[in-house]
Amino acid sequence: MARYSHLLLACGCALLGLGVVMVHSAGLGYHSAETASGSGGEGLWAGLTLFGTRHTAYAVAAVGVMLLASRVDAGRWLAKRGWGNPLFLVVLATIGLLVLTAQVGVEVNGARRWLRVGPVQFQPSEVAKWVLVAALAWWCGRRRGVMHRFGPGLLPPLLLVAVVCGLVAKEDLGTGVLIGAVALSVLLAGGARWWQIGGLVLVGLAGAVAMIWAAPFRMKRLAVFMDPWSDASGVGYHPIQSMLAFAEGGVTGSGLGHSVQKYFLPEDTTDFVFPVLAEEMGFAGAALVVALYLVLLWVGWGVLQRRADVFGRLLGLGILLTIGFQAIINLAVVTVVAPTKGIALPLISAGGTGWVLTGLMVGLLAGLDREEGEAVAPGGVADGGMNPPAKRRGGVGAVA
């Protein structure tokens, strides 16, 4: 009988499958030859081969990690007390990676967001956004009774959020804002008061405005957003080419591999892969992607509603909010509803770190859909007012 976890895994694999197809299709441009040694047809073919092999390997790894993680009940594994919980060391290691990245990270497009360890290059900010979700869920589960009090309940996780967001936002404001928004949402669901979170939101907005004001390129990006044609060959180039891709796609699209705008659209395999998808697969393909995200979020919500423990429910909520907020931001940017910002589309935009870690978290979310996790809270933690539903057995249809 079908369970929520089965639908979650199906949606995750479907999005990854679309991602592999579109990344390869968008990569059929002359820029793919940058990875090749030659400049002619043979060099282009070699570049495409290397490009395709690398991203196919990432996708296979992401699917494998997703399936393995779905066999783990994170609500029992990560909700332990004391130093036996791996979260302590993981949080410290993550902060260390962020500090190291700021000092000796690989600079790409003027920002240090990547860290190279031997042949492996990854983004520590991708690790940080998921580790922070797990850490906050753990804290709220343990301190549920005092989360409404600032000192013993809210202050310690806020200090962690401030450190992580500060280190990330220094080089990537968009990801820092994403991490902060998810963190405050989890804290609110974990027992913090509305007025406390509201005050923190105002402080966060003031900090974001200050960072935008202090960076001329961010101010220019915001100004050009209102009229992209005022700087058509500069900051307005991305949104203009993106809108052209949507216009060329129409309802049915031009067909896989037949995008024209991918030759002109920067970051066509990463942040702006969705316009290429819309051009080649049309409105129907774009609607399919949005539908898959909506189903994933809806099914994920059903999973966390079946949990009785606070940690499992908050972990699931944090995973859903991260995927949902990130997808909304990316879609808003590429449809020119929001200013240009480098936020990837989860499970579709190219990126080894992003694919593997997002696959891992979708797998952990699927792993929360377990019978034994519905009645007993790990470590004896009381629900503390989250009103767990009565234990239900069976598949998806048994849940209201």
Image (cartoon, rainbow, N blue to C red):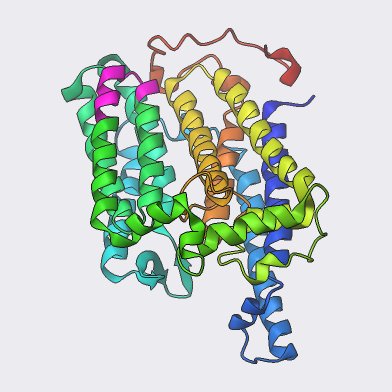
Q: Position of residue 280 (x, y in %)?
A: 77, 57
Residue 227 falls left or right of residue 115: right
Identify the image quadrant of the C terminus. top right
Q: Residue furthest left?
A: 151
54 or 81: nearer the viewer: 54
Kindly report the secondary structure that dominates the magenta region of the rendered protein: helix
Vertical comparison of 21 with 83: above or below: below
Q: What residue is drawn where x is 67% and y is 39%? A: 290
Is 190 inside the magenta-drawn segment? yes
Q: What residue is drawn where x is 45% and y is 52%? A: 225
344 or 189: nearer the viewer: 344
Q: Residue furthest front?
A: 230
Q: Is residue 252 visible?
A: yes
Q: What residue is drawn where x is 16% and y is 24%? A: 151
Identify the image quadrant of the N terminus. top right
Q: Position of residue 40 (x, y in %)?
A: 70, 92
Q: Is residue 86 visible?
A: no
Q: Position of residue 342 (x, y in %)?
A: 47, 56
209 or 54: nearer the viewer: 209
Magenta residues (range): 188-200
Residue 265 falls left or right of residue 379: right
Vertical comparison of 372 with 75: above or below: above
